[in-house]
Image (spheres, grey):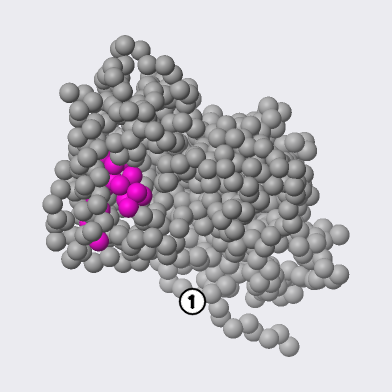
Amino acid sequence: MTVARPRSADEPAERIISLLWLLLHEPRGYAREQIRRLVVGYEGLGDGAFEKLFQRDRRALRAVGVPLTVVGGEDADDDGPRYRVDRDSLLLKDLDLTLDERRALVRARRLWGDSPLRDEVVRAVGVLLHPGELSGQDELEGYHTVMPRADPRLEALTEAAAEQALVRFAYRDAAGALTERTVRTWLLTLVRGRWYLTGWDVDRGAERSFRLSRLESDPVVLEQAPTAAARSAPRRPADHDHAALRARLAGRAEAETVRVWLAPGRGQGFRVAGRPVDPRPADGPAPGEGWELWESAMGRTEDGVVAEAATAAGHALFPVSEPDPARRLAEALTAAADLHAGSADPAWAGVRLTAPVRRRVRTSSEDLVGRLLDIVGLANRAEGIDRAELRERLGVAEADLGRDLEVLRYCGMPEREFPGFQFDVDEADGRVYVHQAAELAGPVRLTLPEAHTLVATLQTVAEMTVLTDADRDAARSAQRRIRACLVDAGQDVADDAPAASTGEGGPTADGGAVVAHWDVAVDPETVRALLAAIAERAVLRLRYHGVRTDQVTERDVEPLAVVQERTRLYLQAWCRRAEGLRVFRVDRVGAVRRTGETFRTRARPGRWRLHPEGEGVSALVRWDHAVRDAAEAYRPTAAATLDDGTALTRLTLLDEEAAVALAARHGGRVEVLEPADLRDAVAARLGRAARLARGAVA
């Protein structure tokens, strides 16, 4: 006797896989009414409800890489068009990757494992190879990343960019104006730790780029072009100049170097990256006794030398030979001081703040179906697959894998018409076997977004200057191989595909729809020395230029990990002087040498902290719309976004020095509202710094 399974949330996945197996079973395909009769879950539905659910299920199959085709039109035969699966392009092709190319893929997966596009990267690498095979063979084993919180808009826009679809969203520009934009999506770019969407702005009739943090609504993919201008919006040009786009998004390049006066023992950010120089008559007199003149790289507009000088709050000033940065510094400090003059507007205290909205971790039907098909593709072989390897390739926890295998036992051909033709899932001696799945003799091909995202992750590896030229070349080689797969991944021709809204022709494969740059400014030799010491458990002696203390110290540390957050690297280590875990900015490490000692592996904390939590001063801070995305780095405990784009956040600042540096760096766009005594201290420090800066340009 067959025991009926209770209805559950897993049934959509069972229905979708049942539909897939039915279409695979008959090369000629099935008509709508045949599918409606055979697949459990469609019965009893009205015509409209069936059509809506059937369309949703077809889109779910395409979303996981299944190439659906439609044979014939409405008058093809008495039953109308027939739906089938293109078996020839269903399975992932063997890329025959070299060892170095496989290592590049594992690096890409590890570096992007916490990103908003994690699922695409994990799945793409997992079906191509077993990451565990290369464990312990990589000098980047001690390198980790802390990505920005997952943003569902990034996932939606990745798919839109892969399809070059039309999207509509509300956007607040740098001037604060809020408008609705209709855009043909061309590509997504990660530059200087920020995501940008570039495409053809239909209303303005020109190429435009949009910072994702300034989107004020979720993007909506337009199934039909609303206007003639939208229908004629061009696709991404084959010769699109991405180098020029990157330079524009990163901020204009300024003078190669700039000279700056530093107070005695202060301005460590300049000291670690620059060099002392002799004053010239054109530089004018020193601002005070003991001040030294240094030369430093100018950097980029948003985070360059003027911002660095501002954070020094009067302890770094430009000579008269540098009139432009001197003027900008005076303007920035004056704006920050004026903003903090007097008491804070009491209206801000009345705004209700709420805890940051975390993205709900939820498995969609597409996620589950994709993972179940991957299990079948990986385990459907005579020798099965080791359960630990399967878990690692899928990137899931043991409990999740157990639930997936249980669901898989109820999947297969439509049970009502083909009883006993469900998957046979067995386990023996730690190995998983799937039988009665001959139609899926390997993993399903990469989806278009997965292929584009994997190309982007390999780009970050190829740009990592801490790797050897050979390793970076291997990443580029793997990138070329994956890029070639984009043609296969773009062959969807289903009648209801979103590609209907993308203009003439199918998706192009001339370049990646997602491009991610490794924009970390750091000394490669220092990073290599840190990573080697981590691997060999060697004690290091660091000469460290403090960020907030503005002092130089020397300390012995046991290095544990190098962590990237946005465009900065941090060393997480056990500091023997402090007798505790500490975090050091790698760009502030002036010298590294081994002491000759080694250390025993310590128990690492369950969650690394790059920023203090629960230590310091709880502050209410207001952020102008143009810089509000910078608040994320401070891990706010509560926040609110107002109608004009202003953000209010409750966060923890280490001390008064940190509050002054924050307000000064953003030059009148960040305001410390409370506590009142902290605001007063910030105002006093900024007022003094502004007077000094203005005096330098008088």
Residue appearing at x 40%, y 36% in the figure: 266
Q: Is residue 603 magenta?
A: no
30 or 381, which lies in front? 381
371 or 357, which lies in front? 357
Badge 1 density bin: few <14, some 14–19, many ≥20, Cα 10 Å: few
Residue extending farthest to the top is 281
Q: Position of residue 217 (x, y in %)?
A: 31, 52
Residue appearing at x 23%, y 54% in the figure: 679
- Check disc 1 and report the residue beneath it: 44
Residue 36 drawn above or below residue 212: below
The residue stretch that appears in magenta: 656-675
Residue appearing at x 64%, y 60% in the figure: 604
Residue 488 drawn above or below residue 6: above
305 or 557, which lies in front? 557
Residue appearing at x 52%, y 37% in the figure: 587
Residue extending farthest to the front is 289
